[in-house]
Each structure stands twice: as C-alpha cells, then as structure tokens.
Image (cartoon, grey):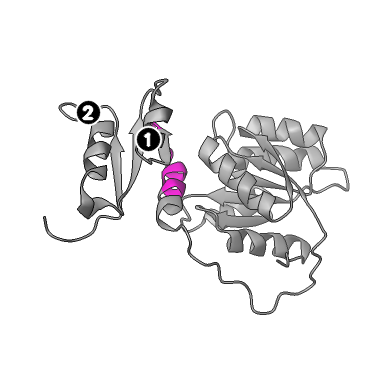
Amino acid sequence: ESGQPIPLIISDVNMPDMDGFELVQAIRDDAKLLTTRVVLLTSGMRTEDPRRCKELNVKTHLMKPVKQSELLNAIAAELMVGVPIVEPSNPVNVEPTRKFRVLVAEDSLVNQRLAIGMLGKLGHSVTIAVNGLEAVKISAEQEFDFVLMDLEMPEMDGLDASRAIRKREQGTETHLPIIAMTAHAMKGDDQRCLDAGMDGYVAKPVRKQSLEDAIFQLFNYRVQE
C-alpha cells in the first residue's frame, strides 16, 4: 500500500488463519510483489513441502531452530545473486593448476552446500565433517591441505576441535592449517581463533574473495580464472 518494494519476506510455515504457503501464494498472485523473494521456516518438514516450494518458486526452506549463520547465508543467497566479485588488481604467484584437499567442518546443510559449491568452483576437493569431533577424527585418518572450521557446532565446537588437532600434532613436524568461520565477527574473535591454534579467519556469510584471500595468506597462492 505504501508503494515501497519489499525485497525479502521471511515467514514461518505453521501459522493460524493463513499458513506460510498460503501467504506465498497470495504474494505470487499480487503483481506488485513479483520481485519479492521468500524464505520459509518450518519446525517439521512434510513430504509435500518440497513440491509446494518448487511450485511457488521458494528456493530456501529452513528447519527451525535456524542457526544465525544459516539464516545469514540464506538471506545473502536470496538478495546478493548476481553481485559481481571485485578481484584483486595484482594477483601474485599464480598457480592455476594447484588443487587443495579441504576438510569442511560445518553442521549446517545449507552452509555445507555453499562451501562445496564455492570450493568446487575454485577447483578444490571437499570432505565434510558435521561437527568438531568428526573433524578431529577425519583429519587424523586422511590427509588435507587445510580445514575450513565453523566455530559453532554440536558435540565439539571449532575452537575445541582446533585445540585437539594442535595437541595431537605436538612432538611432530606436522601442522594442518585451519581457517575459522564465524557468523559473529565480534571484537576479539580473531584472537580467540589464533589462541586456539587456528591460522586464518573468515566471517560468515563466506564470500569467494575473502576465502581466496585467506587461502593466499596460508599458501601464497591465488587462483587465476
């Protein structure tokens, strides 16, 4: 009614009088809201929900309770589509054939897919660990060039997992580089990561450029596209 466009609506599915899917249908039927994107939240996925999402062109359907980082990435994915990435003006030490083996420690399925897609586009192979305990175990069993470690995970968080990896490395010549991922980006987070033995730090939602910069800091290597 105000004439102001609404770029994004975040709606619960289970609501009285008009549920989330009925709301989306009403939005789709309104010509003034053709450009509005919708993120749906639900506490229980029903078998017909994916079909209804596809029919209503809802690309993001998240399970409650939603992690801050998961919601932040969903909003970024909805609103930042097509935004060009500004590449560094003077890339150095270009080695376009180098591929890394990356362990991604992340419990959110949405963020796992984003990491796989982003690292895959850069030519790297990805193994997923769903929590800190699994990251410690997998990193002991397989060889990786670096770990992309979420800070907030069940069972064992990223800081404790990093400490466990560093403790295991004591008395050896091995050092597995670890890049932290956090949605908070609060003052002092970088120091907490360094104190836990991490080597780098990127804020969520992770951008391709910030990830490339973190990799460059570790290996003096930058991808040429």
Pick whichever, 84 or 91, lies toward us: 84
Q: Position of residue 148 (x, y in %)?
A: 65, 47
Which quadrant would the N terminus be assigned to in this image? bottom left
The magenta stretch spans residue 66 = yes
Q: Position of residue 91 (x, y in %)?
A: 71, 74
In the image, is residue 100 above or below residue 214?
above
Mark 1 crowdedness (10 Å alpha carbons): few <14, some 14-19, many ≥20: few
Point 88% across, 44% down: residue: 172
Residue highlighted by disc 1 = 55
Point 65% across, 38% down: residue: 161
Which structural element holds mark 1?
helix
Q: Quadrant of residue 214?
A: bottom right
Residue farthest along the bottom direction in this orientation:
90
In the image, is residue 42 above or below residue 205?
above
Mark 2 crowdedness (10 Å alpha carbons): few <14, some 14-19, many ≥20: few
Residue highlighted by disc 2 = 15
Q: Is residue 151 visible?
A: no
